[in-house]
Amino acid sequence: MTDRHYRVLMIAPTSFFSDYGCHIRIAQEAHALQARGHDVLIATYHNGDEVDGLRTVRSWDVPWIKRTLVGSSRHKLYLDVALSWRSLRTALNYKPDIVHAHLHEGGLIGAVLKRIVNRPLVFDFQGSMTAEMIDHKFLASRQSPLYTPLYQLESWINRQADMIITSSDNASQLLQTDFGQPASHVTTIADGIDTNFFKPQVRNDELLESLGIPKNKKIVVYLGLLAPYQGTNMLIEAIPEIIKAVPDVHFLIMGYPDPDNYLRYAHSLGIGEYVTLPGRIRYRDSHHYLGLGDVAVAPKMSLSEGSGKIPQYMSLGLPVITFDSAVSRQYLGDNGIYATYGNRESLAARIIETLQHPEDARTIGQRNRILAIANHSTAHIGPYLESIYQRVSITRS
């Protein structure tokens, strides 16, 4: 542990805390730093849940925005203005040693604060801004008239950081090849998991009953955002083929937004009775719900973002079916069950094979648990962040 205790202002331009990917990473980093004696303050939007043990300051209330905003949204333009003002006032009073910005909007705010308070900026890169805009259909394609100026803005934000942290080696490589970042200014801290909290579960029959799922089913679980780029549509479209081969299967697809819309989609395909979509699951309860599963799926379609759900599945001792990508292989290595990237038929085939060989699936799950403890525990996060803060502080002094 370093002798120096840092005061860290985290900029989180999102509805923190909201039980999904980037929010979990922010909370894990803040908890890891506090456990090692550092002081962390998180500046975030007006809405979102409080997290025990974490301090937040929120931008002014916007009464017509109560729901969680996921991905690109025009509402974020004025929400980020409000957060910028709150962050500035907080920085002047709090006097941080480090400005730690999440997401590109946070990086832009952080770039301004860095100059005003003369402190290093660490940027937590959680995926390409322009790639995410295309994923979320905010931009139609790279040929959109807005793509070039937004790409230039993204490149400028990247260059303002004293150090960029990514969640995957794939993202680090993207920053170097697509944005020209020098390797010395990019480092990877993979998403971690509390392996003492997320551990193999005994299937909870009462929870099954509350969800309306019969006890004798083979259960495939998914927990995350519901969106095409997350592979939700493709997973549901694969189910008709799967139930032909494994008629006693049931899919527990958890998350938000719009679970009712996805359930209607399942009914339109004639598979509604094979699918349960309970909506948002609190992070603190997620291990009980995932513990109902025999198999977990992570069919994410984005190549620019990490996949924090994979180490969560692994820590619970579940076999993981995912598309074959550099990000997935970084977590799972040779222990992943890989479908051809973006191929629905291949995804269905891998799920069928795994369900039809339960002993092999259990063995893979046991190996995943071992890998999670060895490679993906949150214990690595605090020391890595400390070393980064020390390095950027020395560089600027």
Image (tube, rainbow, N blue to C red):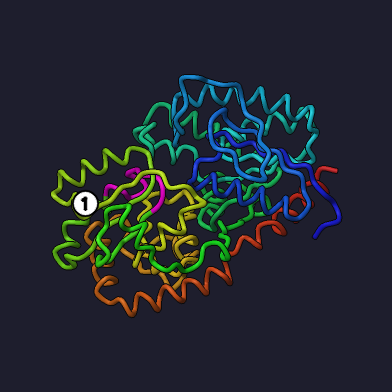
One can see residue 160 in this view: no
In the rendered image, which residue does mark 1 sit on?
Answer: 237
Residue 16 in the figure: left or right of residue 5:
left
Q: Position of residue 2 (x, y in %)?
A: 82, 57
One can see residue 388 in this view: yes
SS label for mark 1: helix
Residue 380 in the figure: left or right of residue 286:
right
Q: Residue at x 49, y 64 (%)?
A: 331
Residue 63 in the figure: left or right of residue 115:
left
| Viewer-closest of 174 and 306 | 306
Q: Residues within 10 Å of mark 1 (few under 14, many from 20)?
A: some
Q: Quadrant of the N terminus?
A: bottom right
| Viewer-closest of 381 and 394 | 381
Q: Residue at x 53, y 50 (%)?
A: 177
Q: State the extent of the magenta-drawn residues as a range.
A: 223-233
Q: Is residue 231 magenta?
A: yes
Q: Please tell me in which quadrant of the rendered image residue 49 appears.
A: top right
Q: Quadrant of the C terminus?
A: top right
